[in-house]
Image (tube, helix red, strand yellow):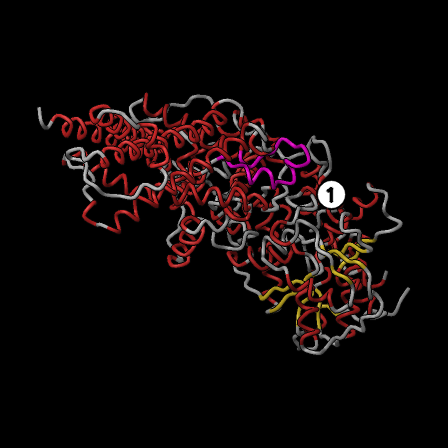
Amino acid sequence: MSEELSVKTMEAFMAEGKQPEILFWVGSAGSYDDRAKKISRAFVKILNRANVEFAVLGPEESCTGDVAKRAGNEFLFQMQAMMNIEVLNGYEIKRIVTCDPHSFNTLKNEYSSLGGNYDVVHHTQFIKELMDDGRLSVKGEFYKEKRITFHDPCYLGRANSVYDAPREVLKKTNANIIEMKRHKKTALCCGAGGAQMFKEPEKGDMDINVLRTKDALDTNPDIIATGCPYCNTMMTDGIKAHEKEDSVTVLDVAELIANAEGL
Amino acid sequence: MEYLPNILFAIVLIIGIGFFSKNVKKLSRNIKLGKDVDVSDNKSQRWKNMARIALGQTKMVVRPIAGLMHIIVYVGFVIINIEVLEIIIDGVLGTHRIFAPLGALYDFLIGSFEVLALLVIVAVVVFWIRRNIIKLKRFIKPEMDGWPKKDGNMILYIELVLMLLFLTMNAADFQLQQLDAAHYTKAGAFPVSQLIAPLFDGMSISNLILVERTAWWLHIIGILSFLNYLYYSKHLHILLAFPNTYYGKLTPQGKFNNVEAVTNEVKLMMDPSADPFAAPADDAPDPEKFGASDVMDLNWVQLLNAYTCTECGRCTSECPANQTGKKLSPRKIMMDTRDRLEEVGKNMDTNKGEFIEDGKQLLGDYISHEELWACTTCNACVEACPVSIDPLSIIVEMRRFLVMEQSAAPMELNNMMSNIENNGAPWPYNQMDRLNWVNE
């Protein structure tokens, strides 16, 4: 096990009568999914390195309800949203960062109609901010000359027009950033959104993640970078389907930065 | 007898426009069957979107070949309408080329109409080849079988014929001007039709007049017929693209609308002072239906979307589900919505304006569960649409009906949802373990 992570709950901040700089919304995947937990840990290492005072909700956090809303269960979504809003507003949270574009979209766009108004940023935006403010620097040796292609998560890209932050962060590693033929606005979905993550796909002649991974593999990459835990799972499975797991890895932008810094 | 052509023309014009306004009324009645939705916000942004997307064709050129060809036909359509105005005035007043006194400007106008007409012919031929010879994938999907395919070609044939009539009319006119025929004012420039004119060499003035008049009448009758064809065709987009882009979604694509009716219920459920056993008041309205199973459950902008769709299939060709062989096609969602809405409209026509239950609905009879559940909500279809149609909003509205009114979600999704209800995560883990990742 690597170095100890410093993670404080909102409850602890409250007890000290302090407010953190930002709340880290871990999300269900980041909390429970084995692959996504590594992303949460990598991101916390970055936050620790940059001396960011952040809090998590811990057991007080609950599913944003995004997946319930996309599945059509507006009741369940609004129940979840109202519970979360009660907690967030109770702690007077102003700013939230998350590694999950689905949580990002829901917290940013869909909680406002139910009384939750926050400044929400995706972790790639926050990392870029830390770099711009000189609070975080990347040595740029570890991934030098490596070929990296970035897969745009639908709920970060098309849904919220965030295209530049992850790319600018990746550029700092001095890697070769190669775009897939379909990228940014025309990026193909990984196949996980709209509650597909939790069910078998309908009958067809191919799985969406296999098709999207082909897009990525066509750029002949060493690494496929993503900014979403669900995309990560889908692309990792896709690489296995193409039997490329020995030569290509799928990493989150946060993991790439943490690795580059030897964190 | 002298005024017979004028009277005849006025009658043709009145029939053409009268029939068209009848269809416009029907169209507007059908669209208003949709639920009300507030789109009165951000007027300036809406005008800008209309100017940029519909007038400026910005989303068409994402695919450069089709985009360029489309702009030619579009500009041709808009500009040549100035000529139609002259034809109508001439027809009513019995004049000939009434705008001729514009002089050099008139020559320039007629000349540019001719060049555009030729370009339109080229574009139409290219379009026809793409549909019928190259058979581009998006034009041969299952939902295009039958009428939609015929409709697509019919539009091209009509446009081709109209342009040929226009050029024939000008060619004969040019010859008549050369022969100093009475009534044929020397005006206009004919860069294209003078190339056809030699075909009429040696024809008598009376025969030339016959050709010119025939082409002139067929041209204007053709245009009026085309106008009335719109209501039955995907070609309706030439009018509806404008309101549709005006009323298009302004919020980030990822933001799905909030269902107010649910908010009221949830607030009541979470209100500790609410009496859980209270019976509804006698005068309480029926509880609102959640989601959509038929066209009347959709909002009117969604119905306007359906009439605006020109079945280009850019949405379907970008759809990840469709690309991997699933049944879902966003274009079919829009076509089904229009077909069902038309069916409801016809039902009302035959029942004195009242809809009589016909045992059918959009869900099941037109759109299957399988299609709805294949969507990844990725917004690729919304992004691809050149006229701001939102097929995704209809899919989600129908999922809402399936889940909240019928509990008809796929089993795995029901498991996922009960996990969220029980432990606040889509997986069956204890909420108290949410922070375990820190020390693993």
Q: Position of residue B373 (x, y in %)?
A: 63, 36
* Residue tagged 1: A209
Q: Which residues are magenta?
A: B311-331
Q: Residues within 10 Å of mark 1 (few under 14, many from 20)?
A: many
Q: Nearer the viewer, residue B291 or A138?
A: A138
Quadrant of the drawing holding the C terminus of chain B = bottom right
- Check if residue A226 falls in the magenta segment: no
Instruction: Output the chain of dot 1.
Output: A
- Tell me which amino acid carries mark 1: Asn
Secondary structure of the residue carrying tag 1 is helix
Query: What residue occupies the far left of the structure in this picture?
Result: B1
- Above or below: residue B437 compared with residue B234: below
- Above or below: residue A217 compared with residue A107: above
- Check if residue B321 falls in the magenta segment: yes
Q: Nearer the viewer, residue A109 or B408?
A: A109
Q: Position of residue B22 (x, y in %)?
A: 27, 31
Q: Nearer the viewer, residue A34 or B156?
A: B156
- Residue lying at 55% horizontally and 51% vertically, measured from the top left: B253
- Residue lying at 42% horizontally and 48% vertically, measured from the top left: B54
Query: What residue occupies the far front of the structure in this picture?
Result: B202
Q: Position of residue B288 (x, y in %)?
A: 45, 39
Q: Nearer the viewer, residue B6 or A227?
A: B6
Corner quadrant of residue A237: top right
- Above or below: residue A35 compared with residue B315: below
Corner quadrant of residue B347: top left
Quadrant of the drawing holding the N terminus of chain B = top left
